[in-house]
Amino acid sequence: MNTSFFVDVVFILLALFAVYTGWRVFRTDSMVRASFFLLLSFITVGAIMLLLSAMYLGVAMFFMMGVEMMVMALFMVMFMMNPAGLNPMMMVHQHKLSIGAGIASFVILAAMALLSRFPVQPLPAGLEPVSSLGNELLGDSMLIFESAGVVLLATMIGVVVLSSQRGRFGSAQEGSMPPGLEPGGEPAGMPEEDSGAGGHHHGH
Amino acid sequence: MAVSWLSRLAARGPATVFPALGMQGEEAFYQLALHPEIELVDSPRHASLLLVAGGVPPELHEPLRRVHDQLPAPFTTLWYQSEPLLELQQAGVVRVDSLEALPDALVDAHRKVLRGELGVSPRLLVDEPPNPWRGLGDDGHGGEGMMGGVPYGRPMAMPPTQDLRDGLALDTLTFRLGPFFPLWPAGLEAEVILQGDIVQQFSVQSRPFPRAMSPVFFDAWEHAMSIARLERARVQYHLRALFHALHLAGLPDLAWRALRLAEACDRQTITALEKGFKDFERCLKRRGFFALHLPTCGTLNTEHAEALGGFAARAAGIEGDARRDDEGYRRLGFSAISQQAGDTQSRWRQRLAEVAQSLTLAARAQQNDAVTATTGVVETPRGVWRDERPGDASALLEKLLPGLEWGEALATIASLDVAGVSQWARP
Amino acid sequence: MILDQLIWPLLLVFATLGGGVYLLAVLDGLAARSFGLPQAQSVWLLPLSRGAWLLSQQANVTEAPDWWGWRLAPALYLTLAAIGLALVPWSRDWVATDITTSLVLWGSVEALATVVIFLQGWSANTHLALIGAYRYVALGLSYILISMFVLIGVTLPAESLALTQVVASQQELWNVLRQPLGLPLFLIVGLSITFRGPFNLADSTDLAGGTSVEVSGPQRLVWEFARSAMLVAFSGIATTAFLGGWLGPWLPGPLWVMLKMLAVLAILAWLGRWFARITPERCISLMWLALLPLSFIDLIWAGVEALL
């Protein structure tokens, strides 16, 4: 391995920053700040990928993680019962167990990274990362990626449909019951009376 | 050295003023909005000068102190036709009582503030948070859900809250927007509950100050009045309301043009006004004021429209106009115009159509020197004045605004005129 | 060689950032004057005196903001704008950042800009700023999609994601003529991402300044500077992707780039002042029902043209 000294220093700094911001995700007291610390950690990992000459994957990491963490932070503001996500709140449970699990997995993964022997496969000269990635996506692995894309699209449409308040037979507020088989009769195809959805509950 | 060069450069710029309007303070506001060297800003943080125009009643002194403390140093306060707060009188604040001297006083104060001639800007309130930030229990876990109590004084958003639209129910955000908010009538204070950016609840805490109308309407109630003068005053009223709506729409140059037309209403000839207004109306349509900005929401139902009266009722299809019963108007060939949908867009179309109609009537009235025939009833731009002046209608907002997006809600408030008519005429 | 590869392009980037922002402010003042709004001073002095005034003001505090996020957000936005401008090739050899995936880096600049604008509004811990921030984010996804499709259309004739190759592919014909839908869509997206003019839903008047309602002093100066810098970077990318970058007779490459950027900035400044602000409902309908299908058509057009 004959990487230059400068690259080594940058790699170590980025790695330390990634671990630090990852730790801060759990120690901060606001969900929005947690999302943005996670974003910083991912951006640092993307920068490390750029150091590994994965030009497309590293930059795509910035792109994707930016939008994902932004949507997550927005969901925190929208749904977390915490006005604007700025009120101090403690978000971790079972402290001892989680700290133990975190340290254990860090030690195991670090041991795997440092002690295993990676094969020596230098990059071929004249590698074009973007076109080789494109050939892979639309060549050998086309079925995987296209089906994954269609499944994602179906999930997105399903989420929008499920969260709509307009049921098939009317608004969800009024129970959205289908009409009866005779006029004024019982709703068709419905099971016996079931209790209404639980009312007031404090969720986590 | 560099600091003084910088502050000299800054002093040459426009004077940034935050107008805190009290009772009868709008006249100063409209004069200053036309002045090129004065910039009226919407947030106290963006200003160097606080102008308190018009009397502030004692119950609003606490909000005034909070607004005062929001201005960033260096700043100073100017009081126009208003008694300065007791704490400030020792600091030697400037009180101006004449409208002609006000712009120069503001520019002068701006220069003095930037050159550092006025010393330390006083702060009126203690620099401590008014509500405790800790929730109940350790880590704020006591009480309801994951946080206890009311940290920062903010009520928690407890589920389930009914959302007025599709999808998952968003948390609620409750806040109060105060009497000196520049984007709605002065004096209106409301507690707003938002889910996302949709208004869920709008409760009026303090009604807007009554607005002073032109003395022409008061005279017309008592005796016969020249129709040309009456219609000119009506045009001026609607154009001034249009200024606020255009400022809200992000069209500052058209807002300035509307206000200039309004100021020219007393002086210019009718033909010049008509031509100017026709160009202006064409510009409004081309710049997307109706197509892009004005929403088709905020519809008044029949009962509300009848209670409100005036142009809002006519925009909702109720054809009531006291000018129809006046012999002087009938001779000029007056016929009431109305729209069908009672929403924000049609209210503005109605107002612009009424301005055009008023200008035509004034042109005809000027030829014949026509006067009104009946007294004791006047069709003011705000509504009909028979035995009582048109009153405050801010309770209507509590029913009209829920379900509207925030920008649409403000546009709806700007299209209505909820403030009542003051018993004193404009000086 | 270090002079050519590093010093000159970086100097050009910094000069364009400073000069471009100033010239954009002047163009905005000229546009306002042409619409009849009287200005307090001459258009050349007004940006300077406003900047000096903002520097002399105190940077205020709110009750309990997120300090790091609030104070850093304008600087981060400026950094993103500088990164975007660094991707622009000034001539055949002068590029500050020449990577093979520069268009994807520009896409990530747009995505991270959304994060930073949200941070500016949310960190202030006040209601009007928060509404401005999440209103912007709710609409931001639509803009990014359209911009990405339009830029992918531009990469097809170039057969590369690098902006240098995109300029090289415009030797015979500029992309503004080859893909006529591209530049208008990209300009609309530019106005939306820098929330300017008709698409100003983040710092709008109906929120008394939106995300900057509580910001004053030097922080506000850096924020306004960063907004204009982002628009300058946008015009740089538009020039490179659609108007042929440094291609042109007689004049040296960098001068052509700056002239074309100035033209794009003038159009954007004028458009920003002309239209009224659109409501969020209509904005979403416009983006998803009109502009997104148009960007698909643009992409199909570019694909068909690349096949022929």
Image (cartoon, helix red, strand yellow):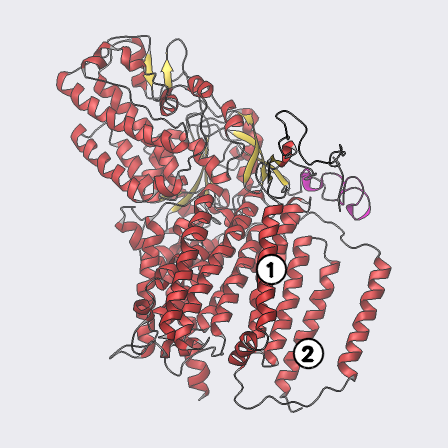
Identify the image quadrant of residue A39: bottom right
Q: Percent position (x, y) of residue A15?
A: 69, 74
Q: Which mark is residue B192?
A: none
Start-end of magenta stretch: B134-156
Res B5 visible: no
Which disc is residue A152 wearing? 1
Q: Dot 1 falls on which chain?
A: A
Residue denoted by label 2: A12
Dot 2 surroundings within 10 Å: few (below 14), some, or many (20 or more)? few
What residue appears at the point 62 percent right and 88 percent down from the top-left corner?
A4
In the image, taking residue B145 as reference, residue C41 lies left or right, namely left
Magenta segment includes A94: no
Please, which chain is the residue tagged with disc 2 on?
Answer: A
How many marks can you see?
Answer: 2
Judged from this view, the residue extending furthest toward the front is A182
Q: Amino acid at mark 1?
A: Leu
N-terminal of the pair, mark 1 or mark 2, is: 2
Residue depicted at x 27% and y 46%: C36
Q: Give coordinates of residue B364: x percent, y percent.
A: 16, 21
Q: Examine the structure image and report whether residue B145 is included in the region drawn in magenta.
A: yes
Tell me where residue B356 appears, x and y as whole percent. Answer: 25, 28
